[in-house]
Image (cartoon, rainbow, N blue to C red):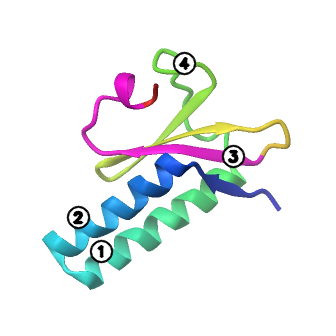
Amino acid sequence: MKHYTLSKSADKDFELIFVYGIDNYGLEKATTYQNKLINRFHKLAQEPLLYPSVNDIRSGYRRSVYKINSIYYKIEKNNDIIIVRILGQQDPYSSLN
């Protein structure tokens, strides 16, 4: 079975998305959104080539868009993936460096 891991930056992004969701939409909706993001992470791990590469932003990275968030990830040599960032409206050119 293929796996995914979150970088420290992606883990922080994930936490901030949750806090924002609670503050703006309530705990139930925030939890639902987080669970759906986790489902997307599992899908990325199972089908990492399903989503397009974004070599113009960062060589070797791919992006999966879920609602307002872009999930940037890279495929490791063992075909596991590392989720590098989960960005909303941040500039990916400066946020991925």
Q: Earlier in the sequence, mark 3 or mark 4?
A: 4
Residue type (three-letter) at the residue carrying disc 4:
Asn
Label 2 – label 1 distance at C-alpha: 8 Å
Element under label 2? helix
Q: Nearer the viewer, mark 2 or mark 4?
A: 2
The segment highlighted magenta reads 80-95
Q: Kindly identify the residue that appears in the image at 30 percent across and 74 percent down.
A: 30
Q: Which residue is mark 3?
A: 81
Q: Which residue is mark 2?
A: 20
Residue type (three-letter) at the residue carrying disc 1:
Ala
Q: Is residue 94 magenta?
A: yes
Residue type (three-letter) at the residue carrying disc 3:
Ile
Element under label 1? helix
Q: Which residue is mark 4?
A: 55
Residue type (three-letter) at the residue carrying disc 2:
Tyr
Pointer 3: residues within 10 angstroms few (<14), some, or many (20+)? Answer: many
Q: Is residue 16 magenta?
A: no
Locate the N terminus and report the quarter of the image it occupies.
Answer: bottom right
Pointer 1: residues within 10 angstroms few (<14), some, or many (20+)? Answer: some
x and y percent of residue 71 in the render? Answer: 46, 45
In the rendered structure, are the residues bearing label 2 and label 3 in contact, judged by CB atoms less than 8 Å apart?
Answer: no
Q: Earlier in the sequence, mark 1 or mark 3?
A: 1
